[in-house]
Amino acid sequence: MVRVEINKKRHLTAFVITCLVFIIGMLIGYSTSSARINYLQNTGKEQRLEIDSLQLQSLYVRSLLEDENCPAITKTLENNIDTLEKTRARIESFIEDTDNKDDYRLLKREYTLEQLRYWFLARETKKTCEQDVITILYFYSDEEICADCRTQGAILTNLKNVFKNKVLIFALDANFNDEPMVPIITESFNVKKTPTTIVENQKFEGFTEQDILVNEICSGLKEKLGVCNG
């Protein structure tokens, strides 16, 4: 009889401990989830502020373009494209942390529009100011579809580091149809596969070796950099 009572007490104690552990786990989980939600909400707001800032900067560049103030245009455009690249990295980091598909879609759409806006501005600036720069439009897709896109992107990043402000690179997800401008651009350049790289008006379909891209960039530059003589 005593043993039965002891066993009952043990079972009751074990049950209480289990309940306490479960409740504590729930509270910790709720606290963590709330903190994560707050973090993602704040991060999302920050990304949208970055996008708003880029939009305002692009308007400023366009106003300079109307006055043909080329030194100011060139400097501002370069700085803004650098900011655009940093914003891309921050948005991608935010996208990886959030499960909210709507946030993902909206932020990616906003960023895609900014990419295109600056691509347009870069083309206009080159004509107006006769800039000695090369613009590259790069079409990629998810790794599941495009095994070579990550490597191609790494090559383009390396070329940007080598040529610096002589090369402006704009990357678009060729399959991101949530933004109507994407299929319009892909149709304009007749992009049928990824990766596809457009160096000025020269299209390279599929994976393209770095040497080929270097030769194409160098052929379009008036000032031949050291890498072009190698």
Image: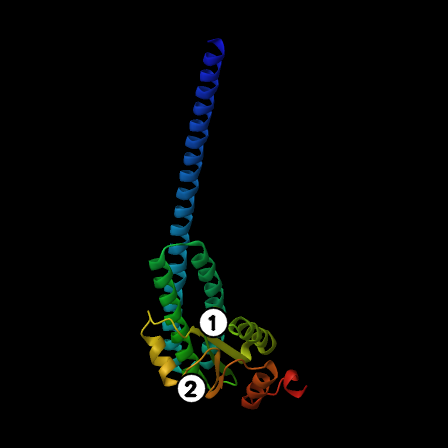
Eyeballing the image, is 28 above or below 10?
Answer: below
Circles 1 and 2: CB distance less than 8 Å? no
In the rendering, at what x and y percent does residue 109 appear?
Answer: 36, 67
Q: Quadrant of residue 22?
A: top left
Which residue type carries mark 1? Ile
Q: Quadrant of residue 107?
A: bottom left
Return the mark for residue 81: 1
Between the C-alphas of marks 1 and 2, the distance is 18 Å
Eyeballing the image, is 108 above or below 63?
Answer: above
The quadrant of the rendering that contains the C terminus is bottom right
In the rendering, at what x and y percent does residue 150 appear?
Answer: 53, 70
The residue indicated by pointer 2 is: 128
Residue drawn at 45 percent across, 54 percent down = 97
**Does the rendering let one see residue 71?**
no
In the rendering, at what x and y percent does residue 131 appear?
Answer: 49, 85
Among all residues in the image, which is located at the extreme left?
180
**Does the rendering let one see residue 5?**
yes
Number of marks in picture: 2
Residue drawn at 66 percent across, 83 percent down = 226
Which residue type carries mark 2? Thr
Nearer to us in this view, 91 or 194: 194
Q: Nearer the viewer, mark 1 or mark 2?
A: 1
CA neighbours of label 2 inside 10 A, class few (<14), some (14 to 19), many (20+): some
